[in-house]
Amino acid sequence: MLDLIKTKALRGEPPSRAEALRVLSDEDEVLDVVAAGAAVRRRFFGRRVKLNTIVNMKSGLCPEDCFYCSQRLGSEADVLKYSWITARQVAELADRAVRAGAKRVCLVGSGRGPGDRDVTRVAAAIGAVKAEHPGVEVCVCLGLLADGQAERLAAAGAYAYSHNLNTSGERYAEICTTHTFDDRVDTVRRAAAAGLSPCSGAIFGMGESDDDIVDLAHALRELRPDSVPVNFLIPFDGTPLGGRWDLTPERCLRILALFRFCFPDAEVRLAGGREIHLRSLQPLALHLANSLFLGDYLTSEGQDGAADLRMIADAGFTVEGLAEPSPGHREPVAIRRRGAGTDLPANT
């Protein structure tokens, strides 16, 4: 069946429900599943890895109650809380990431959704980033969008808008009560209608079943995202899901393979939680995902940037757009870890 699933993906066709469930089961050896997915990845993306980075413009202080999130209403997680950083600060952080190889910079702000003043702030930050790096893709992630906001972000120079569906519609109320699955779908559609590249994915490890994963993949396919971030739950103490450690490296690889089969020519992005759940099998995941976040996430530290670059090279991949180092060339300086030293943003 793996040969059939692979052949369909190479033609741009998704697996059937039964085939998708087979990928998630243990009927086939995980290395055989990865090998089938790797053939699809190579067809559409070769051995290139696209690097992305997050600039957290506003942290904590969120009125939503997403059970997985350290910034949620009532969270007792020990995370930084600050209001909007300046456009200049954003540009400086983005510059570091671009020099380290990032092709996309994602500007993120916590909250249910932006107000008009927030969109103005983010538009200024987009302009500051693009002034120094005209070719960089600026992705924005600000929550639920209202009328006209996606158009304003596009006019300011944003390339993409990111808003994950996170889990299946059937169980969405089990992970959030302050907004709905349909609210999220609506925002992804608003972004796409405004000409922004739709970026939407999921978080796994929250108690979802195989059926939930397949339902979510089908819902995402209906939205036709260009980028699909695959996150694995970081179980923060002080959140309702703080005690969940359901994932194994093999489970993560099977999920990544399924998403490669479902989105053969889209950016499947290895995102939050990869370090703690894939552990020593992270390099194997690069044979499925063609994109990953470099450095830190919103409120947690990621793998050191230089270590990521070594991992990519050691696995036989190349960083998209980054020149090959000459003999004796020093590796790019690692991006500072979240909350380190002078990178602490000021309240503005």
Image (tube, rainbow, N blue to C red):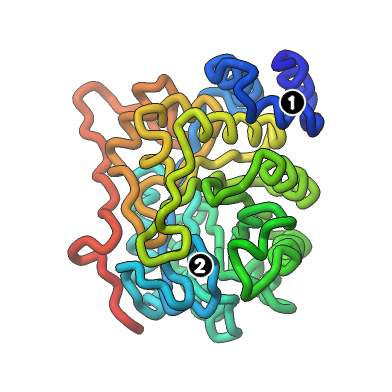
Query: Is 218 above or below relative to 120?
Result: above
Residue located 48% across and 77% down the image: 73
Q: Is residue 146 left or right of residue 286?
A: right
Q: Would you name the residue on which mark 2 appears?
A: 126
Q: How far across and down, in percent of the image, does residue 245 sit? A: 43, 45
Question: What is the x, y in percent for residue 205?
Answer: 52, 46
Residue 346 in view (yes/no): yes
At a point 42% along the width and 34% down the height, the residue shown is 278
Pointer 2: residues within 10 angstroms few (<14), some, or many (20+)?
many
Residue 123 in view here: no
Give the position of the N terminus as an image quadrant. top right
Q: Disc 1 on helix, strand or loop?
A: helix
Number of numbered discs on residues: 2
Looking at the image, which is closer to me, 158 or 224?
Answer: 224
The residue under the point 55% across, 63% down is: 140
- Which labelled disc corresponds to residue 9? 1
Amino acid type at mark 1: Ala
Residue shown at the point (45%, 51%) measured from the top left: 244
- Where's residue 228, x and y in %? 62, 45
For this view, does 105 lie left or right of residue 228? left
Nearer to the camera, 173 or 151: 173
Earlier in the chain: of badge 2 and badge 1, it is 1
Above or below: residue 159 compared with residue 70: above
Labels 2, 1: front one: 1
Crowd around label 1: few <14 · some 14–19 · many ≥20 (10 Å):
many
Mark 2 residue type: Ile
Give the Cα separation between the discs numbered 2 and 1. Answer: 36 Å
